[in-house]
Image (cartoon, grey):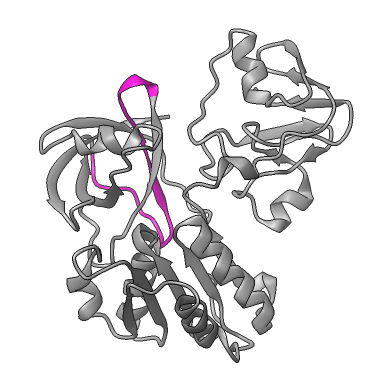
Amino acid sequence: MTSRARIVRVWEATPEIRCFALVPVDGPPAPFTPGAHLEVHLKGGLIRQYSLWNGPEDRDAYLIGVKREAHGRGGSVAMHELGVGDVLEIGVLRNNFEMAEGGGPPLLLAGGIGITPLLSMARQVAARGQPGALHLFARSAPQTPFLDLLTALPGAAVHLGLLPPALDRVVRGLLAAPDPQGHLYICGPGPFMDLVEREAILAGWPSSRVHLERFSIDPSRLDQSGGEFEVVLKRTGKTLRVAEGQTIIAAMEEAGITPMTSCEQGVCGTCLTTVLEGVPDHRDQYLNASEKALGTLIMPCVSRCKGARLVLDL
């Protein structure tokens, strides 16, 4: 289900990152929590998700930041062509990067544009008067988004121009001696997230207290190995054969079905589908460990079947 929202303000956070304030056409913004993202429908059938960076005092508009990726999949370029007054179709708000309730002070580590969901979290923590720390790693001061907000935010620090091995040392120091009740939140480019996750494991952070949100992953890491299997689309009454090396989404498109999909990397949640029968072989970065263990949901853009047959609520 979609609704309409109007762009009421556009401004530059850095030479590459443009911010947008969107207001629903038919009512106030829906309630949301830090870590939520907004689904935006763009020309050419593109669907993209952008994390909200609102603080608790910002509830009259959805605030997003979009980094222009000249060699991306087209979404950021399309967003950067928009201006004040343009009306977009938006989807429902989703949050698969919720902050845990209780526990020790959160530690938030961001790389570049990965600051957006963590900035929302840090602003919430600060508004509650709770302790916490936010660290943003950026290439330079001109390329640091939201520098004015970060300067005024308690517990926030910016690290500029760090490259390995200096970057590794700083990250290692931040993760040393983890609080047994603390939670770690990570968002940023893939290599940065891989580094932080690896150092967190080495430092003894429990996996249940390490939370990640990936905007994209290296396509070379997508695994479509495995034999063919059958997929039954319960609502449409169709049965498909998914070939070896083929995704469920690709099999649907081959059969003339146009599924709702966006990233096709298992990170955004757009194609999230209920499993009615069968055992999914999860290969996504969207569902958490407990959701995967239940086996009732699947990301058909990347995940497969552990048996011979899946029945999906499609």
* In this picture, residue 292 sits left or right of residue 94: right
Instruction: Say which quadrant the N terminus sits in.
Output: top left
* In this picture, residue 68 sits left or right of residue 245: left
**209 shown above or below 73:** below
Does residue 254 show up?
A: yes
Instruction: Say which quadrant the C terminus sits in.
Output: top right
Q: Percent from the top left, x then y, of residue 50?
A: 37, 47
Whether 40 is among the magenta residues is yes
Q: Which residues are magenta?
A: 27-45
Image quadrant of residue 224? top right
Along the line of sight, which residue is nearer the eye, 216 or 87?
A: 216
- Which residue is the extreme one toward the bottom? 177
Residue under the point 59% across and 7% down: 256
Q: Percent from the top left, x then y, of residue 12?
A: 15, 53
Along the line of sight, which residue is nearer the eye, 30 or 17?
A: 17
**132 shown above or below 54:** below
Whether 261 is among the magenta residues is no
**3 shown above or below 207:** above
- Which residue is the extreme one toward the top? 256
Q: Percent from the top left, x then y, of residue 96?
A: 53, 54
Does residue 98 show up?
A: no
